[in-house]
Amino acid sequence: MQPDELIESLRTNRLLAIVRGTDPDAALDTVLALFGGGVRLVEVSLTTPGALGVIEQARAVLGPDAALGAGTVLTPADARDAAAAGAAFAVTPGVTAALDQARENGLPVVAGAVTPTEVALALAEGAAAVKLFPASLGGPAYLKALSDPFPAAHFVPVGGVDARAAADFLAAGALAVGVGGPLVGTAARPGGDAELPARIAQFLRLAKGEQPCSTS
């Protein structure tokens, strides 16, 4: 996947699902359920046991064109391993040593940053987009403030993004939102989560600009 392809997919779909679980089989089922339900960008956190195997197996099922990425990419080895497993992009929690290696392996990077200095560094290091993390620290108003000195930056808020926050961040100009627990719930753990399809539908509606109900 090329950086501009990742940006266009984020702009079009506006939702990046984050799978972080405790069971590789459940995590794989969750990835497939997300894509099957209509989510078009999914990252598998490398903190998930067997995450590389999950990515490899999901890629085999989904085919070469699915926007399936690796998250919590911290080191050059993480980036190499993620690319070898079939990840199409990498997501980092900060500006880490993985960025150069990810690019060398053909993975565009959504690099984590929260301060102006970190945003500037992420962009200088060639990040395709900036993961505003943790987004809950400043909220949509902080996103707007950061966008003023960095008008060309593509921001993807992650961390504490529930349905209401997702709608607010998108309205504030986020390219897309990254959503983990509020979307995935316990689906990537043993026992699964029967409510996952309903939450997928809810967040897809939000990505299309519908407002959440007052109880969300």
Image (cartoon, helix red, strand yellow):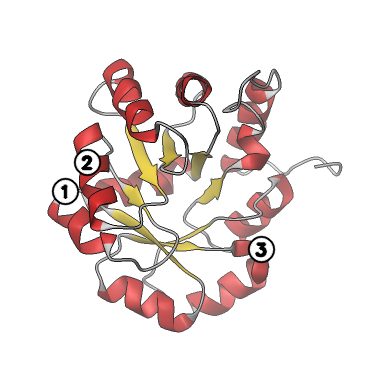
Q: CA distance from mark 2 to mark 1?
A: 8 Å
- Which one is in front in this view, the residue at disc 2 or the one at disc 1? 2
Task: Report the residue marked by disc 2.
Answer: 83
Image point 45% across, 34% down: which residue?
A: 49
Q: Can you give x and y, in whole percent of width and height, for residue 97 in the image?
A: 28, 65
Does dot 2 land on a helix, a strand or a loop?
Answer: helix
Image point 30% across, 60% down: which residue?
A: 128
Of pointers 3 and 2, the one earlier in the residue sequence: 2
Image point 52% across, 39% down: which residue?
A: 20
Label 2 crowd (10 A; few <14 / some 14-19 / many >=20): many
Q: Is residue 175 above or below residue 26?
A: below
Q: Is residue 150 above or below residue 136?
A: below
Does dot 1 land on a helix, a strand or a loop?
Answer: loop
Q: Is residue 73 above or below residue 27?
A: below
Q: Can you give x and y, in whole percent of width and height, for residue 152 in the image?
A: 36, 71
The answer to which image quadrant residue 190 occupies is: top right
Q: Can you give x and y, in whole percent of width and height, for residue 194 in the image?
A: 69, 17
Task: Report the residue marked by disc 3.
Answer: 136
Circles 3 and 2 in contact, beta carbons < 8 Å: no
**Is residue 192 visible from the viewing direction of this image?**
yes
Circles 2 and 1 in contact, beta carbons < 8 Å: yes
**Which residue is nearer to you in this view: 141 or 18?**
18
Of pointers 1 and 3, the one earlier in the residue sequence: 1
**Which residue is nearer to you in this view: 8 or 161?**
161
Q: Amino acid at mark 1?
A: Gly
In this rendering, would 103 be left or right of 88? left
Image point 70% across, 45% down: which residue?
A: 163
Q: CA distance from mark 1 to mark 3?
A: 31 Å
Label 1 crowd (10 A; few <14 / some 14-19 / many >=20): some
Q: Can you give x and y, in whole percent of width and height, for residue 29 in the image?
A: 49, 19
Task: Report the residue marked by disc 1.
Answer: 106
